[in-house]
Image (cartoon, rainbow, N blue to C red):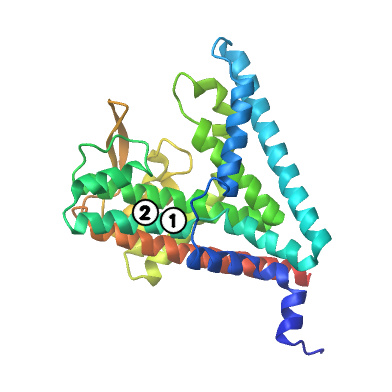
Amino acid sequence: MEQLTVWQWFTKYSFVCIPVLAFLLDIFIGDPKSKYHPVAIIGRIISFFEAVLYKETDNDTKKLWYGGIAVGLILLTVYILASLILWIGGVIHEWVYYAIEVLLLYISISPRSLAGAGFEIGQLLKHGNIEGARQRLSWIVGRDTADLDEGEITRATVETIAENTVDGIVAPLFFFILGGSMGAILYRTANTMDSMMGYKNQKYLFFGRVAARLDDILNWIPARITFILLVVSAFFLRFDAKSAFKIGVRDANKHPSPNGGYAEAPVAGALHIRLGGYNQYFNKMTFREYMGDPIEAMNRNHITRSIYMMYFTTLLMVIISTVITYGMMEQ
């Protein structure tokens, strides 16, 4: 059998290394805040097509159709732009093409920014800065945060970290396995559309419905993979893996989203806390069914533990995507 040097191996199996390199970039660089960030550019593309196609005077049927057309045009535009950038990279050099592939996956995952927000809120709570924690929380959740106490701030943060483990980590890596870096960035586009247009308010109830349903469909399998990985993470981190599995099976379907509960419920079980409850949006109180049992009173330590679970799940998914792509190349 031919013995390969490290460089020869890397050259041959460079595609296999993309998830690891993207993860390392996220660890060391994070998610830079810039108007030139690709996701920010995707957001402007979404806003452009929304401005062109949304008309307040249209009836509900037209809004539904035009919203669907917007989804198609946005995905097509991002696909063309990403393909053009990759093509230019390939013209320059094959390693430039490869670097762009790594960057596309890197910007599609966001564990460090998710952890950073959680740690920052936890530190503000640790120093008794409730007002600061409320304000920082308002950057990452849609609910009203002005009157939340430490327990409710913790609940909102843990719920966000758990749910975003699906669409910020597991799903992009899942679609990388299926379609390479292009699959990951198209998924990130669909998820960004949902975050911008998937609201159930007067403006987006019909216009944003296709974007919301597409996001639900795309996240269906990744959410269930996340459930399994969170239980495994709880086991290795010496949290309550048995409860994570039990509560996940019992309560996952209580979430209003078809996918969110598969991340939140196992975290609630592993940490012996209860998620869900009353949330206020735009001064309107709503109730979401409870997930988990209130064995422990929620505090900032649960934020830290949920971040540990998120990062361990990320590591597991990076390993899985690397192993699967390696196996695909060996066939």
| Residue behind mark 2 | 117
Residue 275 in percent (x, y) is at 30, 46
| Residue behind mark 1 | 113
In this rendering, does residue 274 appear at all? no
Answer few, some or many: residues within 10 Å of disc 1's Cα (few below 14, many 20 plus, some between 14 and 19). some
Label 2, secondary structure: give it: helix
Q: Quadrant of residue 276?
A: top left
Residue drawn at x 19%, y 51% as measured from the top left: 129
Task: Give the amino acid at mark 2.
Answer: Ala
Residue drawn at x 41%, y 35% as measured from the top left: 256
Label 1, secondary structure: give it: helix
In this rendering, does residue 143 appear at all? yes
| Left or right: residue 247 compared with residue 173 | left
The circle drawn on residue 252 is: none
| Left or right: residue 162 compared with residue 290 | right
What's the distance in space between the residues labelled 2 and 1, CA to CA?
A: 6 Å
Residue drawn at x 38%, y 39% as measured from the top left: 254
Q: Quadrant of residue 152?
A: top left
Seen in the picture, residue 47 relative to 37 is either above or below; the reply is: above
CB within 8 Å, label 2 to label 1: yes
| Left or right: residue 260 compared with residue 182 | left
Quadrant of the snapshot with the C terminus: bottom right
Residue drawn at x 47%, y 63% as measured from the top left: 313
Seen in the picture, residue 171 relative to 12 is either above or below; the reply is: above
Residue 155 in percent (x, y) is at 28, 47
Quadrant of the snapshot with the N terminus: bottom right
Task: Give the amino acid at mark 1.
Answer: Ser
